[in-house]
Amino acid sequence: MITEVRLRPLRNADFDRVLELERQLFGRGAWTYGMLADELAGLGRWYIVAEPERLDRAGDQPVVGYAGLWFDGDVTQVMTIGVDPAVQRHGVGRQLLTALIERSRKVKAEAVLLEVRVDNAPAIEMYRDFGFEILGVRKRYYQPEDMDAYTMRLDLAVPADAPADAPADAPVDAPGDAA
């Protein structure tokens, strides 16, 4: 079981492992080598991988997750998040999503957008935990499976730790402040 992962930029040497995970996770809808290479070459792209943090081994470890983001100058779009099925539900996806949101804040994006299969309850739950809201449904978005997707949005104008009912410009207590 993995307790800690280290995030780092995706490298060309990671392509084979990422594509292996793509096939496991997304079947016929998985990206090909050419699709991944074209995606990474696009302007405004930022891709990372997660590898186990192993104290008993030196060097890179097998990639157990990956995620990518596209910034168009206004908003960021989560292009993909994938986690090895053997380590799902161990926090790897949350760490990847946290890094994507932090990057979005760093580039001063107004919001983070994403699409998720309507039948992917664990992912939808995770996105909602982060504050994403469903905007609508994109019919037959995922091909060749003809699966619908929810479009979700996280507004970055609201501070990450602000209470949901507080105005966006309201002061936020620092962690540890007494109420």
Image: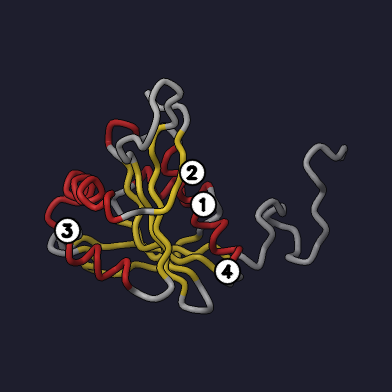
- Mark 1–mark 4 Cα distance, whole angstroms, equals 12 Å
For this orientation, the residue located farthest to the bottom is 73
Q: Classify mark 2: helix, strand or loop.
A: helix
Colour convention: secondary structure
- Mark 1–mark 2 Cα distance, whole angstroms, equals 6 Å
The residue carrying mark 2 is 95
Residue 12 location (% of width, % of height) = 28, 56
Q: Classify mark 1: helix, strand or loop.
A: helix
Residue 148 location (% of width, % of height) = 26, 62
For this orientation, the residue located farthest to the right is 178
Q: Earlier in the sequence, mark 2 or mark 4?
A: 2
Residue 164 placement: quadrant: bottom right
Say which amino acid is labelled 4: Val
For this orientation, the residue located farthest to the front is 58
Image quarter of the N terminus: top left
Say which amino acid is labelled 1: Ala
The residue carrying mark 4 is 107
125 and 157: which is toward the camera: 157
Residue 116 location (% of width, % of height) = 34, 57
Q: Mark 2 near mark 3, Cβ–Cβ under 8 Å?
A: no
- Which residue is pictured at 33% across the width and 39% down the height? 64
Say which amino acid is labelled 2: Gln
The residue carrying mark 1 is 99
Residue 121 placement: quadrant: top left
101 and 137: which is toward the camera: 101
Q: Mark 1 near mark 2, Cβ–Cβ under 8 Å?
A: yes
Say which amino acid is labelled 3: Gly
Q: Is residue 178 above or below residue 31?
A: above
Q: Mark 1 near mark 3, Cβ–Cβ under 8 Å?
A: no
